[in-house]
Amino acid sequence: MESSRMSSGNVVSHNLPPPLADFDAWQSDALLRAAVAREGAHWIEARAVPLGRLVGSVAFQEWATQANTHPPVLQAYDRNGDRIDVVDYHPAYHQLMQAAFGAGLHSLAWKETREGRYVARAALNYLWNQGEQGTACPVTMTFASVQVLRNAPDLAAQWEAKILADDYDPRSLPLAHKRAATIGMAMTEKQGGSDLRSNAAVAIPVSGDEHVLLGHKWFCSAPMSDGFLTLAQRSEGPTCLFVPRILPDGTRNSLRIVRLKDKLGNRSNASAEIEYERTHAWLVGEPGRGIGTLIEMAHLTRFDIVIAVAGMMRAALRQVLHHTRHRAAFGAPLIEQPLMRNVLADLALETEAAMLLAFRLAGAFDRAAQDERARIYARVVTPAAKYWLCKRLPMLAAEALECLGGNGYVEDWPMARFYREAPLNGVWEGSGNVICLDVLRALAKTPGALDMLDVELAQAARHPAIARHLGLLHRAVHEEPAGGEARRLTEGLALCLQAALLLEHAPPAVAEAFIAARLGGQGGLAFGTLPAATDCAAIIARHREA
C-alpha cells in the first residue's frame, strides 16, 4: 500500500503516519484524569496541564532523542593529567533535568500539604515517563533520599532545602553555593549484587559521624549528583553513609569514576563503576543497620517504578493507536482490521489495568499515616505491582513495536528507545526473585495483610478464578511461605487486584474481558488473543485521544 511520487526533486510518501507531535498527554487521557480525581488529587490539574503539553511537544521529543543519541562521556583527567572525574552530558540532558526538577517531580510529595499529594506527584511522574526515562532515575533517587537523610538530622538540616528546591544546578560546587542539589546512590558490588550483606567496602570512623571509605562499587547511579547514599561495612555490620561529591571546603571528594557502563538502554543517564579511596562520608542511621535504613528508600523508589512503568505502557499504546489510525493495509485502516483490533484492545486492557493499580497504590501512600489498611496495602502491593508491571512492560513494548512493523525497529521512531528502556525497571530496586520473596515476606509478617486482601477483593472474589488465587495466597501464608512458588503467587495477586479495580471503575465488558483473558483461561499467552466475544472496538475507544 506504499507509494511515492516525485515533486520538485523530493519523494512524497503516502500511507506513512504523520509524526505524533504536539499532543497533550494530560488533557487527552480521560482515564488518567478520572483516576487522579478519584484518589483525591484533582487540584494537580494546574501543574499537570503544562507538563502534559511539554511532554507531547516537538521540543521535548527532540530533547529526549538527542540526550539518548549522545550519551554521557567520562572525562577522567584534564589536559594536564590531573584527575577530575567529570561526566559530560549533552545539553539536551540538562534541558530535560531542568524541566523535571523545575516541575517539582522530586519534591511535591514532601512540600505539598493538601490531600492527595502522592497521587498528585504520581500524576506528574506518569506524564514525564511517557516522554523520557533516563532523567527519571535521578528524580526518583533525589525524591526518596529525603526519607533516608532524616535519619541523620544534622545532614538533613544542611541538605534538605537544596534537595527540595524546584531547580536544577549541575555545577560542581560546595552545597552552600548551589541553588539545588541532586542525590544518587551507590550500593551494588560485583561480588554481591542483590545480597547487600556481602558488600566488602569498609567505613573507617574518623571523628563523630565522619568516616572514610575504602572499596569498590559496581554500579553508581547518576555519578554527577551532589551526594550519594551508600553502604559500607563497620564492625557492627552494613552501615548507611552519605558521600558528598564536593566537600564543604570546595575540594573534590576522592570518589573515583573508573568507567561508565555501556548500557542497553537508559542511555541519557550515566551509570558508573567507582572506587572509594579514603572517600569522606557521614553516618546515616544506626551503625550496622544500613540495610534497614535503606529499605525506607527502596519502598519509595519501587513505588516510583510502578508509576513509571504504567506511564511507559501508556506511551507505547499512544504510539500504536496513532500509527494504526493513519496506516492502511488491505484496503482499510489498520485499526479497523479485526485481528489488529484484538491486539490493540489487549494492549489497552493491560495499560488501563496498570494505571488503575498504580494510582490505587498512590492513594494508599497518601492515606497510610492515618489508615492502617492503607499502610498494609502499600507494604504488600508495592512489591507485587513492581514485579508484575515490570514483567508485562517488555512484552507490551515488543508487541507495540511490532504493530509499527519495520519502522518500529528503526531509531527514527521512538518505539526502539521504549523497547530498550523496558527491561531495566525489572532490574532496578530488586530483580524479580528478590521482589517476589519480599511479597511473601510481607504477607507472612505483616499483621492483617490477608484480612486487607480479603476486604480489597471481597466483591471481585465472586469470580471463581479470583477466589481461587485468593485461596492460594491464604494457604501459602498459613502453611509456610512457598519460596519456589513466589512468582506464581505474586502474579496471581497482582492480577486479582487489577481485576478488582477494573470491576469497580471500568465498564463490565472491559473488566470481564480482562478476567476472561488473564485469569479465566480464555486468552492465550501472547497479546491479541482475547476471547472472540470481546468488544474490542469499545475497549480501544476508551483510550482514543480526546
Image: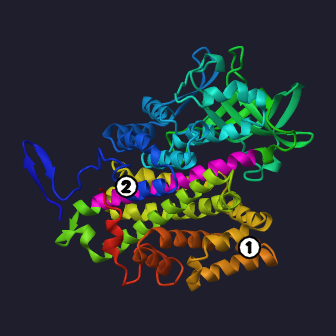
Q: Is residue 41 magenta?
A: no
Crowdedness of circle 1 by 10 Å Cα count: few (<14), some, many (20+)? few
Residue 155 image offset from top left, x and y in percent: 74, 28
Q: Residue at x 74, y 36 (%)?
A: 150
Secondary structure at numbered mark 1:
helix
- Which residue is disc 1 drawn over? 484
Relative to 244, residue 399 above or below:
below
The magenta stretch is 294-323
Q: Is residue 18 visible?
A: yes
The answer to whether residue 26 is left or right of residue 231 is: left
Q: Earlier in the sequence, mark 2 or mark 1?
A: 2
Crowdedness of circle 2 by 10 Å Cα count: few (<14), some, many (20+)? some
Relative to 489, residue 397 above or below:
above
Q: Please give the label number shown on residue 29.
A: 2
Residue 207 image offset from top left, x and y in percent: 88, 23
Residue 361 image offset from top left, x and y in percent: 59, 58
